[in-house]
Image: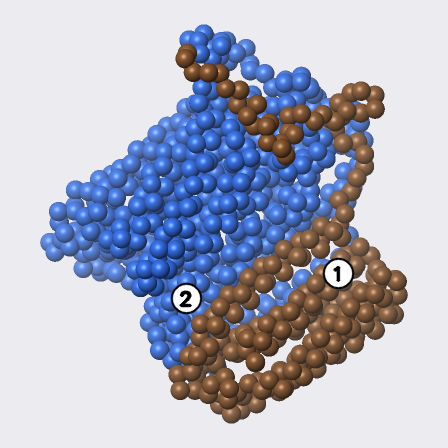
Chain colours: A blue, B brown
Amino acid sequence: MLVHLQGPWTPLIGRLALNQIPYDNPVIVGAFIFSVAAAAVFAGGVTYTGRWEYLWRNWLTTVDHKKIGIMYILVGMVMLFRGFIDAAMIRTQQVMAVGPESAGHLGALHGYMPPYHFDQVYSAHGAIMLLFAVTPILVGLMNIIVPLQIGARDMAYPYLNAIGLWLTTVGAALVMLSLFLGDFSHAGWVGLTPLTELPYSPGVGVDYWIWAIQISSVGTTLGAINLIATIVKMRAPGMIWSRLPVFTWTAMATNIIGLTAFPVLAATLFLLTLDRYLGTHFFTAGMGGNIMLYTDLFWVWGHPEVYFLVLPAFGILSEIIPTFSEKPLFGYTAMVFASLIIAGASWMVWLHHFFTMGAGPLVNAYFSIATMLVGIPTGVKVFNWAFTMYRARMRFDTPMLWAVGALFLLLIGGLTGMMLAVPAIDFQVHNSVFVIAHFHSMVLLIAFAIMGAISYWFPKVFGFKLDERLGKRVFWYWVAGSIMVFVPMYTLGFMGMTRRLDYISHPSWLPLIALEEIGIGLYWVALYYQVKQIYVSVRDRRKYRAGPDAWWTTRSLEWMTHSPVPFYNFAVTPVVHARDEWAWRKEQGLTSLRPDRYQDIHMPKNTPVPLILGALSFALGFGLVWRIWWLSALSITAIVIALILRSFDSDTDYVIPAAEVERMERQGSGVSGTTDTGHFPAGHAAGKRRFRAARPQDQ
Amino acid sequence: MGLPKIKIADLDTGAPWNNGHRTIDVAASGTTVLWDSSHHEHDAISTRTFGFWLYMLSDAMILAALFTAYAVLRHNYAGAPTAAQIVHPGYAFRETLLVFSSVFAFGLTMSALKQGSRAGVINGIVVSFLIGAAFLGMEFHEFSGLISQGITPERSGFLSAYYAMVLVHGLHMVFGLLWMAVMVVQIMRQGFTDNVVYRLLNLKIFWQFQAVIWVCVFTVVYL
């Protein structure tokens, strides 16, 4: 039943061969040297400082939701960098390959990448940015913040949480490996059928794409189960549904999407796998296969996936904007319902990704109207944020800049989305870079929210703030880069430029494409200041020290414990009295963080099993990509055995005695007790008074 | 300013389910209770079974996608044998009876668990296991017969979907049997600890879910 392969195959090493290493491509060799050097610097640094044991004990085997969240974000950041490099490569190829006179380098007729390589780069860019950069970062943020916002000690299933992290990491690792061993899919991040079928893609590229996504999306599904169960089951006393912070509500909505949508992707990729490995005919051209079945199933997942990404971003904005507007979020109830309605609507609009399929006017009309309806709850959200800021005492710290920037992107992306929702317009611009510019506006809104969230919650997690001056510089260069790249892109879309072009036949487009390249340069400057910001902030961390309430006007529960958050989160579980509990306590003058008495704390023990399962999953993915059957069979058997053995281990928790908690709280970091009153420091308060005096309407 | 002053907080608290800014928990002594000093533990069994229900929902979505694929491809015979030629509703009906008996036996296992009878639980699981294994034996017989006649999944879109649909359910059954075997060992070694009990409850959900899916398979594929 196994398919007949083109090219060599041996039982021992499957399709592996020396010529699968692209050592003749200088671009990839350069990337390889960079990656090896980065890994060597990391390993050398850990060895030099003697921290392997620390790394193993405190990070690799941890089940602490905050550390797992940090690692999710680190994986996402590495992949964000890789995805950005891909973007820069795409833009550079296009600016170099304009018109028949343009020169060719490195074996390409025009530009520096031959079409097959270029196709892999844009496929990797899309898959990485959505699934291995933004998804892990948002999952990481939810991991860190949701348990804190609901007053929980940890997630409902800490061990499952660690498994989710390592499965996501395995997916990212497979994508990175495809760069240096074999190749990556050239069929777009969506996997266009029948191009992904074996006769048209006989190499390992599509297999890498399949298994990287398949393994990491198992992790995402498990993570969704975990977050929903955490929100439903682990809330502190008094944290009734109508008091749940909006970020937690959006986490709930988004994980309902994750839980229901990712399995559809798993099933779709499974059927494609059967086509490629066993020769079945689900999505083949002919023999009873149905190509559009794949497209439908993919976007039945794909569209909810987009809202899976955007809802936490909306949640982040709903946390940042009230803090820096110094008043409660306007329209909490409407905000919650809007989130849940968006989650539900995400299931009803998938066909708008292919209005041109020819499903007929009735089908297109239904999906067109459904798509436009999504604009209603989203519009409600935008107006709620606007009303929160209306007549507020706004402060433009870095997180607020990102949040307000995100609103502008939402406006642009949302309105162009409304245009695309009209099938008559969509037929004109389908497959053009106008569509690309539209969804990049939306994804950039998510990226802006992420950047805002990182600067907003960084002091909570690490105990010191990121440098404000450099942070603002990063923001403005991002904004400039985004304008420079995407305004020309919208324009080129109207001029008829289609997506995924490795060669531009219209020399008249060159000026706009060159502007986009300058925009990429601005992103590079932003990246430089980003690295500098982190370096400077870590170096001068004493100067940037932050108390529990790092921004002084925060409102929710996570600001009611120390910064950095102790591993047990709250010494004693708080009782919740109000929607914005911390803001309420500050109004009542109840800002002491010291409870009357301490109690024993029940915590989960560290375990290496998730890491081992991750390593075995990597071996499984590797074996399946290269069709090394013994390795695949061995690793799947080992995974089952490891799961069973772990289920026999009943010694998975431990107790910290109350006296020990008290000792840690007292000596802690000098912030225990009543230090932070939630009021502004003297200098800031004075500034605020001046600010008030200048605006009489605020009296 | 000419605009009327709107107190935004007032607008918000008007909602009937919004008691956010009104209720204050007050202790008997009259002071506000800020920290939860009652030593409460989260109910591990209810948390675990809730999570498993969520997992079952995700599994249902996988099967929904497979049923969709089957519904789209069910008449794509591409010259290969058709559904009417290869499926035998009578045979599948006997398989249905086996699935139902196995689930019934597991139901008796759950009654035994309520009474805390270790022997009853183990016997119940063993009986469910044997009937489930008999079902898989029938399925194996059915598919090995098809393959020996050369009716393999790569011959048409319909056959691909037919094999995938039925065998994915079969794979679930295999996992269920493996789970049962592990549970027998765990009960013998550990008795009815919280961990064992929630796993038995989850296995019950899983096993009954397989019967539900089989009813769908029987209706959509075999009838």
Q: Which residue is depicted at the point 60% across and 27% down?
A: B13
Chain letter of disc 1 in the image: B
Residue at the outermost bottom position: B149
Amino acid beneath label 1: Leu
Query: Residue A465 appears at what percent x and percent y?
Result: 51, 27
Query: Residue B97 appears at what percent x and percent y?
Result: 70, 80
Q: Which residue is depicted at the point 55% across and 85% down?
A: B87
Decide: marks 2, 1 in contact (CB < 8 A)? no
Q: Residue B131 appears in which quarter of the rendering?
A: bottom right
Q: Quadrant of the N terminus of chain B?
A: top left
Q: Which residue is depicted at the point 71% across and 50% down?
A: B47
Q: Is residue A597 left or right of residue B146?
A: right
The disc at residue A294 is: 2
Q: Quadrant of the C terminus of chain B?
A: bottom right
Q: Residue A17 appears in which quarter of the rendering?
A: bottom left
The disc at residue A88 is: none
Chain letter of disc 2 in the image: A
Task: Return the residue at label 1.
Answer: B201
Q: Which residue is depicted at the point 53% across and 52% down?
A: A258
Amino acid beneath label 2: Tyr
Q: Is residue A263 visible?
A: yes
Reply above or below: A508 against A104.
Answer: above
